Amino acid sequence: KNELQQFLPGCEIFLDVDDLKNIGELEAYIGRSQVVLCFLSRGYLRSTNCLREVRAALEMTKPLVLVHEADPDKGGGTLAELRSECPEELQAAIFEAGWPMVVWHRIEDFQHVSLKVIAEALLLKTPKYAGEKALPLCIPGELRADSLAFPKPVVLWASTLNAGARELANAVTAAVAGGISITDATPSRLSTLPRSSDGDGDGEEATHMLLY
C-alpha cells in the first residue's frame, strides 16, 4: 500500500487490514471502490473475508487487478496451485476473465517494474483512462530500454529446438534499438548439436545464446 501510494499520490488506497474498522462494512467499502486489487497468495482464496471481497467485486461488476505472489518463501505459489484453492464457481470469473495479472517481485528494480505495471493497470480501469490502452508511466531514476546499448554488435542465437526462444529474441531486439541480430544457426563451437534445418537464420556466428 505505502509503495503504491508513492506512485499514485492522488489516489485513495484502501487496505482492509489497515483501514477496515467494521468487518460488517466490507461490501460497502467494495461498493465505494473504483478498482479492486487482489493479492493472490496461498490461503487468500480460502479466506472467508477475502472471498467476500471477491464475490462483492464481481457482483458489483468492479474491475479486478490480480497481483501474483510467486515466491513460495513469501507465501506464494504457482497459478495452478492458487487456482486449486479457489471455489470452483469463482475460478473462471477470476482466472479466465482477462483481468490484468502482475507478478510481484521483491528485488528493488524489478519491484519498481511490478509497481509501475500495477499502477498502470489500476489507472486504466478508472473512468478517466477507460478509453486508453496504455499509459506512458515513468519512475524517476529507472533504467530505460532506450538507453541500453552494446559496445560491439551482438548476434543472438535462438535455437529452433528451444520453443519460444525466437519470439523472445524478437521482443529483445525490438526493445533494444540497434546492435542485435538473430540467428538460428548452431554455433560452430557446438558442432555436436543438431544443426537447424528449417530456420531462417542468416548463418552469422552467434556471440550470445538466448535460453528460454
Image (spheres, helix red, strand yellow):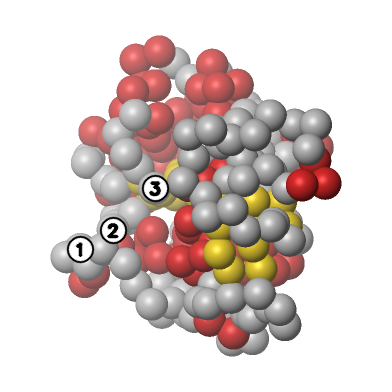
Please tell me the numbered disc located at residue 130: 1
Relative to residue 38, is residue 81 depicted above or below?
above
x and y, in percent, of residue 208 in the image: 73, 57
Residue for badge 3: 100
Element carrying mark 3: loop
Cα–Cα gap, marks 2 and 3? 10 Å
Relative to residue 198, is residue 5 depicted above or below?
below
Reading the chain from its start, which is encountered first: label 2 or label 3?
A: 3
**Depth check: 45 or 26 in front?**
45
Give, as a three-letter code, the residue at label 2. Answer: Lys
Cα–Cα gap, marks 1 and 3? 14 Å
**Dividing the image into 4 quarters, which one contains the C terminus?**
top right
Reading the chain from its start, which is encountered first: label 1 or label 3?
A: 3
x and y, in percent, of residue 64 in the image: 36, 45
x and y, in percent, of residue 200 in the image: 46, 46
Residue for badge 2: 125
Element carrying mark 1: loop
**Dividing the image into 4 quarters, which one contains the N terminus?**
bottom right
Label 2 Cα crowd, 10 Å radius (few <14 / some 14-19 / many 20+) = many
Reading the chain from its start, which is encountered first: label 2 or label 1?
A: 2
Element carrying mark 2: loop
Name which residue lies at 55% across and 22% down.
80
Cα–Cα gap, marks 2 and 1? 6 Å
**Depth check: 119 or 159 in front?**
159
Q: Are marks 2 and 3 in contact (CB under 8 Å)?
A: yes
**Depth check: 144 or 74 in front?**
144
Label 3 Cα crowd, 10 Å radius (few <14 / some 14-19 / many 20+) = some
Q: Are marks 2 and 1 in contact (CB under 8 Å)?
A: yes
Give, as a three-letter code, the residue at label 1. Answer: Ala
In the image: residue 52, left or right of residue 146: left
x and y, in percent, of residue 195 in the image: 65, 34
